Amino acid sequence: MTEEGKTVEPEATTATTTETTAETTAAATTETTTAATTAATYEIAEPSPCVRKISIHVSKDALAGKVNENFTELSKTVQEPGFRKGKIPRKLLEKKYLTEVRRNSRMDLVRDAFDKAKKEISVDIYRENDVDDSVFEQDDDELKLEVEVEIVPKFDLPAYKGVEVEQEKAEVSEENIANVLKGIRSKEGTIETVDEKIDDEHTFITDLKYFIDDKEHAVEENASCTLAGDHPMGLHLHELWAEALRGKGSGDEVEIPMSKKLVSDHDKDASGGKLVVKIYEVKKRIAPEVDEAWLKENDFENLDEFKEQIRKELTFRAEEAQKSKVSRDVFAKLLDQCQFELPPSVMEADKKDFLHHELFHKHDHAHGHEGHEHDHDMDDHSLDDVSEEKKQKAEAKYLEALSERVRDLREPFLVDAIAKDARIFATEEDVSREISALSYLWGISPQQTVEVVTSRGMIPMLRESCRKRKVMEFLREKAKISTVDSAKESKSEG
């Protein structure tokens, strides 16, 4: 081609390409800017090992960008008389929906930032505080807030395989067998009146009269009592009851003095009282004789055969008890190696449980740890109603018991860590077996049991119980167990 006819296509192509690239870059820049301005920023702080504080900032530009984005989406769905969908003027939409869109935009930005922050934390969340919805009602151009989340404690998992433990040889003595035989005979015995002094095995018939400041307050006739039943007429006499009546007999009358504290539930102004107990009859369960007829009733030919069956059952129970003890001993050794801080909510709930037990429920429960999952919503008591002196005493006792309680509170976290590391799970079959056991225990059908445990929200608890049992069995199977003779050990210690 001549010079005049030289083609210019390459230049045109280059120009077009350059222009297209510029447009693409501009579009990309615009998209990046829009994305940046419609996102809240956040920072994560670590005030303590189990706490992460998330500080979220919704800037004016981010809020404006999100509002614009939400109005764009709204215009595609809302309908207004006289306008086609997607053609409604922005000013009309703002007039009707501005407050709602701004609130939802704040909510979207905060929750999106919160979710991103939780992913960045990259550890298991134990508990998170909900964002108070009232913050989204504040019609400000900027929004700043802090949200705390608690994380599952992080700790070095001890080597849980090959832990060395000892177990005692499962042995059954003749005395053990004799006691079981005595218990079987006693259950099949008959209750008869006896001329004996009152002891733990007796029931006695009495008239009870309760006096407050020498005035008769209540009477109960023909009451059937035992020494273990230390709450006659609802009175919490505890050891006073058994001390006063042990060794007494038919025809005796016993007067039990009662302090001002013991009668305060019935009369807070009283100086004291007494309980008068008139004993009319002493009864005892008389066991049947071990003769040929009785043995045949129990499907045994002779006493030796009966004793051998008892020995087998006691040996089985002893072996099962040793298995459980080995599992506990292994777990205890592992727990001793775990020193980690607990989430604040765990400690707060435990302290509240302890104080409530110490201040309000001490009369009704045996001393010791209460369950850590006490339902405070079911409790009508309030710590605000307790004097400062009592609260201080209870808190001092809590501090004394704190070390042991913290150790107990670490248990579920260690179980969880072992289960995850060893890939131990509670299957649906495990849960079904647990439900079958409850069905037998409660005396209702499996279907009824399912309905009960489901309505009470017990399924997660059953699943955790199954998993813990499997973890304990796993630890025992992997342990190095040496068997010792308990009798020889006792002699060597002596």
Image (spheres, rainbow, N blue to C red):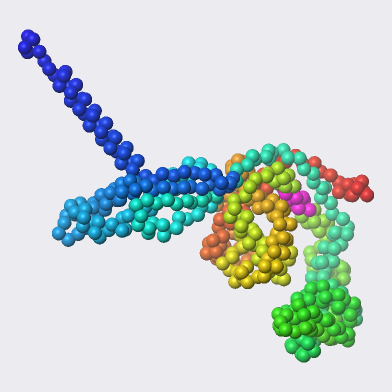
Q: For the point 60% across and 40% down, which residue is it?
A: 421
Left or right: residue 53 compared with residue 477: left
Give the x, y percent position of residue 302: 86, 62
In the rendered view, would you say 310 is above or below 66? Answer: below
**Closest to the observer, 268 or 292:** 268
Q: How many marks?
A: 0
Quarter of the image where one finds residue 180: bottom right
Quarter placement of the N terminus: top left
Q: In this view of the protein, which residue sits in the foreground, 459 or 413? A: 413
Q: Which quadrant of the figure has residue 360?
A: bottom right
| Residue 213, position as x, y percentages in the image | 78, 87
Name the one closer to the observer, 273 or 47. Answer: 47
**Could you tell me what secondary structure mostly forms the magenta stretch?**
helix
> In the figure, 95 relative to 485: above or below?
below
**Position of residue 275 measured from the top left corner of the image (x, y, whole percent):** 80, 83
Residue at image x 37%, y 44%? Answer: 39
User: To which quarter of the image does residue 384 belong?
Assistant: bottom right
Identify whether 322 is placed above or below 359.
Answer: above
For the question of whether residue 136 can be seen, the reply is: yes
Please indicate whether residue 263 sits to the left or right of residue 374 in the image: right
- Residue 302 visible to the viewer: no
Q: Residue furthest bottom?
A: 215
| Magenta-span inclusion, residue 97 | no
- Magenta-colored stretch includes residue 320: yes
Q: Residue at x 6, y 12 (%)?
A: 4
Residue at (72, 45) in percent of width and height = 336
The x, y position of residue 458, in whole percent, is 56, 60
| Farthest-out residue, top | 2
Range drawn in magenta: 318-328
